[in-house]
Image (cartoon, rainbow, N blue to C red):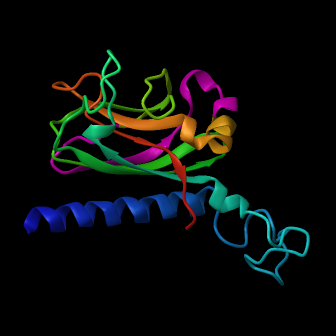
Amino acid sequence: MKKVFTTLALVALVGVTVLAIAALAGAAPGKGHGDKGRADSPGKPDAKSRGKADHKADRVLFARLNGRNEIGPDGRRGAGDPDGRGGFTALIANDEVCFGLTVDDIDTPVAAHIHRGKRRENGPIVVTLIPPSDGDPGASSGCVPPDGGDTAVLQEILKHSNRFYANVHTGAFPNGAVRGQLKHRRP
């Protein structure tokens, strides 16, 4: 019971962190696309954008991580930690990825990334994340630029989120302990 409570507390902490980062990044209601900065319409879309996707919400991504989603170098599914799980939430703004990452039931993480790759395929690293300092449970958060300063990849992630995945590596699972495909999330 204590472990479940600790994991839920970490998930809540990461969620609050991402919301705070979003507010600092200028993605708070009333500060973005749709309201044209007018004081009379805080957070409400104007007539032109009504019915269209909310630009701020389209910048928020999430993934559910688990070991079954990992793909081995030989293409074998389920190559990650069979007990491992986690969550990833990110906001792309100001040419960086502001994220919150939680993991549970894995060894101490040694690395965490966003990779280019569809479901059931491995791919190159495009964003290096800050790994949690512990894996049972553990959490990390922060804002990081894309690898090599390639900000065009951030727009690609937003446009085709399902072509990218987040994963966490450990010493026991150097190719990845837990993984999850990115998806858009509506806050």
- At horizontal 47% and vertical 58% (from top left) the residue drawn is 18
Q: Residue furthest bottom?
A: 40
Residue 77 left/right relative to 118 = left
Camera-side residue of 108 and 177: 177
Which quadrant would the N terminus be assigned to in this image? bottom left
Camera-side residue of 92 and 53: 53
Residue 1 left/right relative to 73 = left
Provide residue 10's location: percent of width, then percent of height: 27, 60
Q: Which residues are magenta?
A: 131-153
Q: Which picture quadrant has residue 160?
A: top right
Magenta-drawn stretch contains 96? no
| Residue 102 in view here | no
Provide residue 149's location: percent of width, then percent of height: 62, 25
Q: Residue furthest front?
A: 76
| Residue 16 in view here | yes
Provide residue 20's location: percent of width, then percent of height: 50, 63
Q: Is residue 158 above or below residue 57?
A: above
- At horizontal 78% and vertical 62% (from top left) the residue drawn is 33
- At horizontal 85% and vertical 68% (from top left) the residue drawn is 49
Q: Is residue 140 above or below residue 146?
A: below
Provide residue 34's location: percent of width, then percent of height: 81, 68
Camera-side residue of 35 and 157: 157
- At horizontal 73% and vertical 67% (from top left) the residue drawn is 31
Q: Residue furthest top?
A: 74
Q: Residue furthest right?
A: 48
Which quadrant would the C terminus be assigned to in this image? bottom right
Magenta-drawn stretch contains 146? yes
Camera-side residue of 4 and 21: 4
Residue 19 left/right relative to 112 = right
- Marks counted in the figure total 0
